[in-house]
Amino acid sequence: MDVSVLISREMYFDNEGKAITVSLKDHTKEIIKNHYASMDDFLNKWNQTDKKAAIVKEMEEQGVLVSALQEAVNKELDLFDLVCHVAYDQPPLTRKERANNVKKRNYFTKYGEQAKNVLEALLDKYADEGITTIESTEVLSIDPLNNFGTPYEIIKMFGSKEKYEAAVRDLEKQLYQFA
């Protein structure tokens, strides 16, 4: 007996446990547009927020199913591109494409050699895992960043924790700059 699947359907549930009856993309678009009327509103919020993890958390609290949306649209996109694509019909860039754009601009040259190597490793980590990973100093204690020294030693390469955090924020600005 030959058996094949004719129709496959995935069901999603919102924060209250109610089934989502429209497509996941339409559901997400509605939530985002209710919170950010225009793409400019979203971009302003994104650019003004130091920790992008806060926006991810906020959207999840509003009912955006980030991981399900990534699975449905493209796992290689981060929340920024998912929102711009789904809600505002913008062509998305993958994390890897964003990271490569920053590398092409030679943005790291203003930092010392060791700090430059750390930022390049952070950029690679972003391409693999996303923005929230590089926002935490915990990333400094995992491979490949731990090869540069302890988190304390790595931060000292930048002069201070404040300067390290400023460099990460600057890296984020470079990532999300429209080129």
Image (cartoon, grey):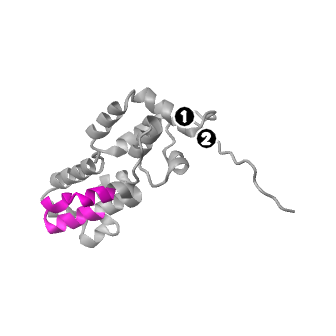
> 117 and 62: which one is in front?
117
Circles 1 and 2, Cβ within 8 Å, touching? The answer is yes
Q: Residue at x 26, y 60 (%)?
A: 103
Mark 2 nearby-residue class (10 Å; few <14, some 14–19, many ≥20)? some
Q: Position of residue 3 (x, y in %)?
A: 81, 59
What residue is drawn where x is 50% and y is 36%?
28
Query: Across the whole image, how many numbered discs are drawn on residues?
Result: 2
Q: Nearer the viewer, residue 62 or 137?
A: 62
Q: Position of residue 115 (x, y in %)?
A: 18, 64
Q: Which mark is residue 12?
A: 2
Outermost right residue? 1
Q: What amino acid is at disc 2?
A: Tyr
Q: Is residue 9 above or below residue 136?
A: above
**Mark with earlier residue (1, 2):** 2
Q: Residue at x 34, y 54 (%)?
A: 98
Q: Is residue 115 magenta?
A: yes
Q: Residue at x 39, y 29 (%)?
A: 36
In x, y percent, where is residue 59?
43, 37
Residue with the mark numbered 1: 27
Looking at the rendering, the stretch of residues picked out in magenta corresponds to 99-121
Vertical placement of 10 versus 107: above or below?
above
Amino acid marked by disc 1: His
The stretch drawn in magenta includes residue 176: no
